[in-house]
Amino acid sequence: MIRKSVLALLALAACTTPTPAQVATDAGLISSGLTAAIAAIAAVPGVDQTKLATVNADLLILQKAAAAISVQSNPTLATEIATAVDDLAPIAESLVPGSSYIVVAIEAATALVPVLLNEAGAPATTKAAMTASGAIHGAAPIPVMSADMARGILRYDASAPR
């Protein structure tokens, strides 16, 4: 009995509550990774300027929310970031070939959205979060990429020379 109680306490101790710093870090990675990806899209000759303007408008919303969440962790700001990613991702991906590293960075940001929402205590109501959790399909979660892999891709994308 005591052994089970000790094991239960150890299990609870292993479950850490996300800190505001983790929320800020993930929001910043999504913002900086997508900023770099969208800048790379803008450099593509002949890119559709109307679609690019739409993507940049969503990116601006995301950047403002990411900057604000770094000061004060807030579920509403996390949802703003998630909604902006949901809005800009399909448009941005349509502007580049599917095998491009830019698409990988966009997918990494999309994969990190449910983690950010969870960390900030926001409901998973955005398309990316619901798809990742399986809620849209009513099935098991769709495997995308781990949060650590997404963070690594976004970190690299934000710092890669162009």
Image (cartoon, rainbow, N blue to C red):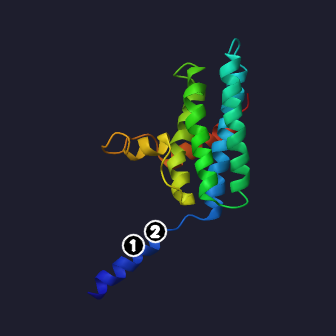
Quadrant in which the N terminus is drawn: bottom left
User: Residue at (49%, 54%) from the top-left corner?
Assistant: 123
Whether 56 is drawn above or below 11: the answer is above
Q: Nearer the viewer, residue 41 or 118?
A: 118
Quadrant in which the C terminus is drawn: top right
Of helix, strand and loop, which one carries label 1?
helix
Whether 141 is drawn above or below 13: the answer is above
Count of numbered circles in the view = 2
Res 158 quadrant in image: top right
Mark linked to residue 15: 2
Outermost residue, top direction? 46
The answer to whether any part of residue 128 appears in the image is yes
User: Residue at (66%, 56%) from the top-left corner?
Assistant: 24
Q: Nearer the viewer, residue 162 or 74?
A: 74
Of helix, strand and loop, which one carries label 2?
loop
What amino acid does circle 2 point to? Cys
Q: Are marks 2 and 1 in contact (CB under 8 Å)?
A: yes
Mark linked to residue 65: none
Q: Position of residue 71 (x, y in %)?
A: 73, 60
- Residue, disc 1: 11
Q: Nearer the viewer, residue 148 or 133?
A: 133
- Mark 2 burial class by Cα count in 10 Å: few <14, some 14-19, many 20+: few
Q: Position of residue 54 (x, y in %)?
A: 67, 27
User: Residue at (62%, 57%) from the top-left corner?
Assistant: 23
Outermost residue, left direction? 1
Label 2 – label 1 distance at C-alpha: 7 Å
Whether 71 is drawn above or below 114: the answer is below
